[in-house]
Amino acid sequence: MVKSSEPTLPSRLDGVFHALSDPTRRSILRDIADAEKTVGEIARPYPSSLAAISKHIHVLEGSGLVKRRKQGSFQFVRINPMPMKIAQDWLSYYEKFWSERLDQFEEYFKHKKKEKKS
């Protein structure tokens, strides 16, 4: 049997959700959404050390949410939206259930409000 080096969908989703679970990593993604930046530029606004930010970038890179390229002595980081799309597709499947439940809650509260007025 040949094993693929490509991660399975569940493990890719786990990696994306793990990466997104940290507010610093989410902030980094927002910071590089419009343009790639060097690791130093990314780290500058944070009170954390460059090493700590580099670890966050490594987690983002492991999840596939960012890509890193080296140019001379600089490392540039850019966003990779594809894993986010996979997570969005996974979440959208469950949206119908959430919408249905929220509609049921709305009807319940409307009914309770009418009962109270009576």
Image: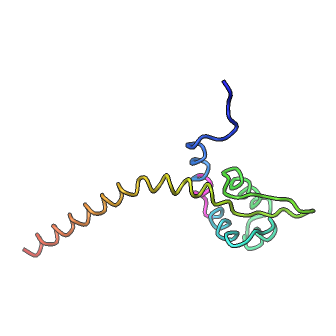
Q: Main secondary structure of the magenta part?
A: helix
Residue at 50% in and 54% down: 89
Measured as percent of width and height from the top left, residue 83 is found at 61, 54
Compared with 6, 68 (above or below) is: below
Measured as percent of width and height from the top left, residue 97 is found at 35, 54
Compared with 40, 89 (above or below) is: above
Left or right: where 4 falls relative to 84: right
Residue at 68% in and 53% down: 64
Residue at the extreme bottom of the image, as rendered? 117
Residue at the extreme front of the image, as rendered? 2
Range of residues picked out in magenta:
18-23
Does the segment drawn in magenta span residue 20?
Answer: yes
Residue at the extreme top of the image, as rendered? 1
Quadrant into which the N terminus falls? top right
Instruction: Give the quadrant of residue 38.
Output: bottom right
Quadrant into which the C terminus falls? bottom left
Instruction: Give the quadrant of residue 67.
Output: bottom right
Q: Nearer the viewer, residue 101 or 6?
A: 6
Measured as percent of width and height from the top left, residue 47 is found at 73, 70
Q: How is the image coloured?
A: rainbow
Measured as percent of width and height from the top left, residue 16 is found at 60, 52
Left or right: where 117 falls relative to 52: left
Instruction: Give the quadrant of residue 23.
Output: bottom right
Does the segment drawn in magenta span residue 45?
Answer: no
